[in-house]
Amino acid sequence: MPLSATAKPRVYWMDAVRGLAVLLVVLTHSYTMPQVLGAEFQSKTLAGIVQFFHSFRMPILLFLSGVLLERSVAKPLGVYYRGKAERILWPYLVWTALVAFALGRPQSLLKPEFWLGGRWHLWFLWVLIACYLIGPITRWIPSWAVAGTFVALLLVLEGIPKDLHRILYWGVFFFLGAAFGRLLPRIKELHWSLVLLSGAATAVAIWAHMDGRYSMGSGHPVTLLAGLGGIVFGLWLAQRLPRLPFLEFCGRRSIVLYVAHLPVLLVACRLWEDVASIRPIDFYLWMASATFLIPLLLAAAYPYVRWLFEFPTAKTRPMPPLPSTGGGLLPVSGSGPIPRRAT
């Protein structure tokens, strides 16, 4: 199927950034989650790597997801919401169920609260669902104003439920991505002083987190600034790197790697938990290998397992032509090859 006349060339460096970010998520969970589950494995090197990238791996994923919003909301509302249901709500439901089985607690699926808020890593899809649900408001209200409203609510509201706090906190990055999506190519041309300032802010954020002074998403709105510095510096640097095919592939299939890795990790920890106490390095190598390789295999076999990540009829249903959005960027969604449409 040829590209739509309104489609723009693929932005490969954005694929690579998204791919690196999602691989860092997998690496982080491969180190932290076994400890949560009681496995005895410690590594100062891995802990340092995880802490080093903590300040901007999730902010950059949310930011890049928001970049897609302007093009999406140009569609008729019915088409827009159907696309989000097929490609975000559907994998959320499928993988929430699979998480319950991976935990060995399928009875949890009978509890309504289990489906709310995003279990374990699925909070990311929970936030995306909420952001895309209110996304069409940006037809009338600028995305930067929505992001500012979220910041204001974080400042004035106290004791709000965790699920709502996540939407407000991480939604700031999403709507800032929507606000500045058209400007991403200009980041490469930033004055050296602004790049240096962003790099310094990133360094301070890394130091503060590794020193235990703050954590992204911890509840304090000031930590939003740390994530923004990392986003600007990371996107500036990415546009200067050569093509990185493996990272680009991971970026195109980021939805697969993101949702699939943790259930695999949970099962692997249960299978090899006895090894953790006597041969911790072997345990980590086996568990981490499964956690990385099985999602990568699923990503490679995407046409055959598509139904796990998008509604089965999503690809075959004919879509109306997409209105022009005035020549904006066409970054790719993380769920497929070069798209006819961005959902």
Image: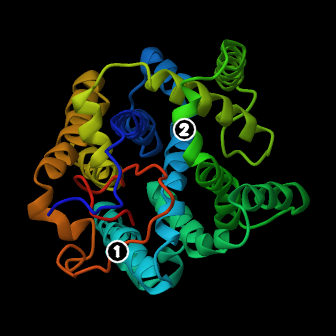
C-alpha separation, residue under disc 2 versus residue under disc 1: 30 Å
> Disc 1 marks which amino acid?
Trp
**In-front residue for pair 11/2:** 2
| Percent position of residue 55, x then y | 60, 32
Residue located beneath label 2 in the image: 184
Residue 186 occupies quadrant:
top right
* Residue located at (10% from left, 53% from top): 301
Q: Which mark is residue 90?
A: 1
On the question of residue 200 being in view, the answer is: yes
* Residue located at (79% from left, 45% from top): 221
* Residue located at (28% from left, 25% from top): 243
Q: Which mark is residue 21?
A: none
Q: How is the image coloured?
A: rainbow
> Disc 2 marks which amino acid?
Leu
Q: Is residue 340 above or below residue 256?
A: below
**In-front residue for pair 10/37:** 10
| Percent position of residue 76, x then y | 47, 82
| Percent position of residue 82, x then y | 39, 81
* Residue located at (67% from left, 26% from top): 209
**In-front residue for pair 214/278:** 214
Name the quarter where the N terminus is drawn: bottom left
